[in-house]
């Protein structure tokens, strides 16, 4: 990693690699690239990894290290990885960086807002939604402009529908609110009965899943059109990192003890994996990659999304986040 400081490292590019003979048995899908972001030597590098070999193909040139909290997004039609870094202790200014998938350029984006929370990037890669304390602003990548689209007290977390038409916002005052994403026009809202967070929209845009904290933590399923409560599941502890499978039949989430899976048709617990950490699913839904927290020993782990074949993947030190390119959006509600 230190050598990157002394050389003009080639930036993240997906290469055409020979596919091993056993690629058909790979639950992740053939030749899917993983994008990992690692902190080391006070800088950050983005890695492209081949899922069939678990080998790093390319590394980006290093760019600024800003802190401990890192997220990454790779929109379906974008040619960039968008990386947000934030120091949870507030000692360093957060950064928002675009890493090109095509050449060696790294751009630090400067929206008119200090991003203490991760932005939500639209699926088409054209804009990012930024959460202020009492407002939401849209940052347009093409021209670098920032526009306030709605004002709301106590905003906590956000999600955008796969087709980009709806914005779902939770507040620390127990509300889930739906807006039109283009102009922030209010659609509807609902009181959740607890502290909602981590909203995620099903791939077909039909449902919104929300983690609800409180004395009796739940995962709630709402109709995406009118926020009618469809069903809810009581869980053992507060949950986050909600990720639906590509076909919408399962919902994966993280709690204090493990990564667990919900059958979304019945909203019942399906299975639980003995693994803790932030995670992503491969685009075909067949593979799960998780990053163990440092106090659990750290490391990146891969297994099938049904829980078989757990193995550690050596991506080098300091990996903070991993991402796949998003699937293309389907029709919304």
Image: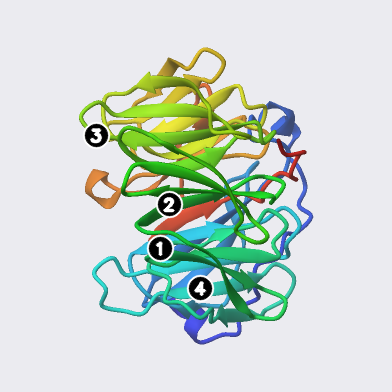
Image marks 2 and 1: residues in contact by CB distance under 8 Å: yes
Measured in 3D between alpha carbons, the distance from the residue under mark 4 to the one under mark 3, in whole angstroms, is 32 Å
Q: Residue at x 67, y 48 (%)?
A: 326
Please state the horizontal and vertical placement of residue 244, each as a whole percent of the image.
56, 33
Residue matched to label 2: 157
The first of marks 4 and 3 along the sequence is 4
Question: Callout 4: few (<14), some (14-19), or many (20+) C-alpha neighbours within 10 Å?
Answer: many
Say which of 210 and 83 sits in front. 210
Say above or below: 105 vs 68: below
Residue matched to label 4: 96
The first of marks 4 and 2 along the sequence is 4
| Residue 279 in view, yes or no | no
Measured in 3D between alpha carbons, the distance from the residue under mark 2 to the one under mark 1, in whole angstroms, is 9 Å
The first of marks 2 and 3 along the sequence is 2
Say above or below: 120 vs 248: below
The quarter of the picture where residue 14 lies is bottom right
Measured in 3D between alpha carbons, the distance from the residue under mark 4 to the one under mark 1, in whole angstroms, is 11 Å
Kindly identify which numbered label has been placed on residue 117: 1
Question: Callout 2: few (<14), some (14-19), or many (20+) C-alpha neighbours within 10 Å?
Answer: many
The quarter of the picture where residue 94 lies is bottom left
Question: Callout 1: few (<14), some (14-19), or many (20+) C-alpha neighbours within 10 Å?
Answer: many
Say which of 35 and 73 sits in front. 73
Measured in 3D between alpha carbons, the distance from the residue under mark 3 to the one under mark 1, in whole angstroms, is 22 Å
Question: Callout 3: few (<14), some (14-19), or many (20+) C-alpha neighbours within 10 Å?
Answer: few
The first of marks 3 and 1 along the sequence is 1
Q: Residue at x 53, y 59 (%)?
A: 72
Secondary structure under the numbered disc 1 in the rendered image: loop
Residue matched to label 3: 214
Comparing marks 4 and 2, which lies closer to the viewer? 2
The quarter of the picture where residue 23 lies is top right
């Amino acid at each position: 990693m230190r050598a990157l400081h002394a050389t003009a490292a080639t930036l993240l590019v997906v290469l055409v690699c020979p596919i091993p003979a056993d690629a058909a048995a790979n639950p992740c899908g053939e030749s899917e690239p993983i994008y990992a972001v690692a902190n080391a030597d006070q800088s950050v590098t983005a890695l492209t990894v081949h899922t069939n070999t678990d080998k790093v193909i390319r590394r980006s040139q290093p760019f600024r290290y800003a802190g401990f909290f890192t997220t990454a997004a790779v929109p379906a039609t974008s040619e960039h990885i968008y990386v947000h870094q934030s120091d949870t202790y507030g000692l360093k200014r957060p950064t928002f960086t675009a890493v090109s998938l095509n050449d060696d350029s790294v751009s630090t984006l400067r929206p008119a807002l200090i991003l203490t929370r991760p932005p939500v990037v639209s699926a088409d890669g054209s804009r990012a939604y930024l959460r202020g304390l009492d407002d939401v602003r849209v940052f347009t990548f093409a021209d670098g402009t920032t526009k306030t689209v709605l004002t709301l007290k106590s905003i906590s977390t956000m999600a955008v529908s796969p087709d980009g038409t709806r914005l779902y916002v939770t507040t620390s005052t127990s509300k889930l609110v739906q807006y039109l994403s283009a102009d922030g026009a209010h659609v509807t809202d609902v009181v959740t009965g607890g502290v909602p967070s981590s909203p995620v929209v099903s791939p077909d845009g039909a449902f919104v899943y929300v983690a609800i904290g409180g004395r009796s933590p739940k995962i709630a399923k709402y109709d995406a059109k009118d926020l009618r409560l469809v069903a809810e599941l009581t869980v053992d502890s507060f949950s986050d990192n909600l990720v639906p499978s590509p076909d919408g039949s399962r919902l994966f989430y993280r709690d204090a003890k493990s990564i667990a899976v919900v059958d979304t048709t019945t909203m019942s617990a399906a299975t639980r994996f003995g693994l803790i950490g932030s995670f992503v699913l491969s685009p075909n839904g067949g593979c799960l990659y998780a990053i163990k927290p440092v106090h659990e020993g750290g490391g990146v782990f891969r297994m099938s999304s049904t829980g078989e074949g757990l193995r550690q993947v050596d991506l080098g030190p300091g990996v903070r986040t991993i991402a796949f390119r998003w699937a293309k959006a389907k029709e919304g509600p």
